[in-house]
Amino acid sequence: MEIETKEKKNKLFMYTILFFTLSVLGWIFEVLNEIRKGHGFINRGVLQGPWLPIYGLAGLIIYLLLKKYKEKPHVVFSLSFIICFAVEYLTSLYLEISKGIIWWDYSKKPLNLNGRVCFLYTLIFAIIATLVYYFIIPKLIKLFEKIPYKVISVICTILLLIFLVDNIYSTKRPNIVRGAKIVNKT
């Protein structure tokens, strides 16, 4: 019984550190994309820290839900497209309702839905998600499995505490990025 509980805790810590790693990788991707566009360093996140939870959430959902389709890359890609679409749309809606700010707007892009998502970017995110699923996540999992239980539990606890503080702080003082539009005062 105790071994089963420890294995469940280990999985929880594994998922937690995977969430944070994917969130940081997403943040790096967005920052590098802004630099590539010539805008310089811009923290693209709602939060102050170097993480974009939308990437961690989408990546974790894809990893957990699509394991049974691992041998079918076309299914993983198709479902990743749907998951990326849903997570981005719902995140945009949540941020607008909860913060009164629109962080991104695809309304000038073709095949967009309410400016929250567009076909091209969802396609790009699905391709990246599929590549991450097959090539990056397995390497991360192998790396995380080498970390002793006590160490990973401490790391996850510290990350969760910092993340909580960042969320509390950012509730009152969200990071408003270039191009964001305030739609109402909350």
Image (cartoon, rainbow, N blue to C red):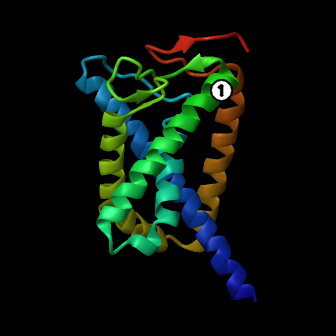
Q: Residue at x 24, y 18 (%)?
A: 38
Q: Is residue 66 left or right of residue 75?
A: right
Q: Residue at x 40, y 23 (%)?
A: 106
Q: Indicate whether 72 appears above or below 48.
A: below
Total numbered badges shown on the rendered structure:
1
Q: Nearer the viewer, residue 69 or 101?
A: 69
Q: Indicate whether 19 appears above or below 115.
A: below
Instruction: Give coordinates of residue 133: x percent, y percent.
Output: 37, 61
Q: Residue at x 48, y 28 (%)?
A: 116
- Dot 1 falls on a residue whose secondary structure is helix
Q: Amino acid at mark 1?
A: Ser
Quadrant assignment, res 171? top right
Instruction: Give coordinates of residue 81: x percent, y percent.
Output: 39, 49
Instruction: Give coordinates of residue 120: x percent, y percent.
Output: 30, 35
Quadrant (top left, top right, bottom left, bottom right) of the N terminus: bottom right
Q: Furthest-bottom residue in view?
A: 1
**Mark 1, residue position:** 170
Q: Is residue 134 left or right of residue 92?
A: left
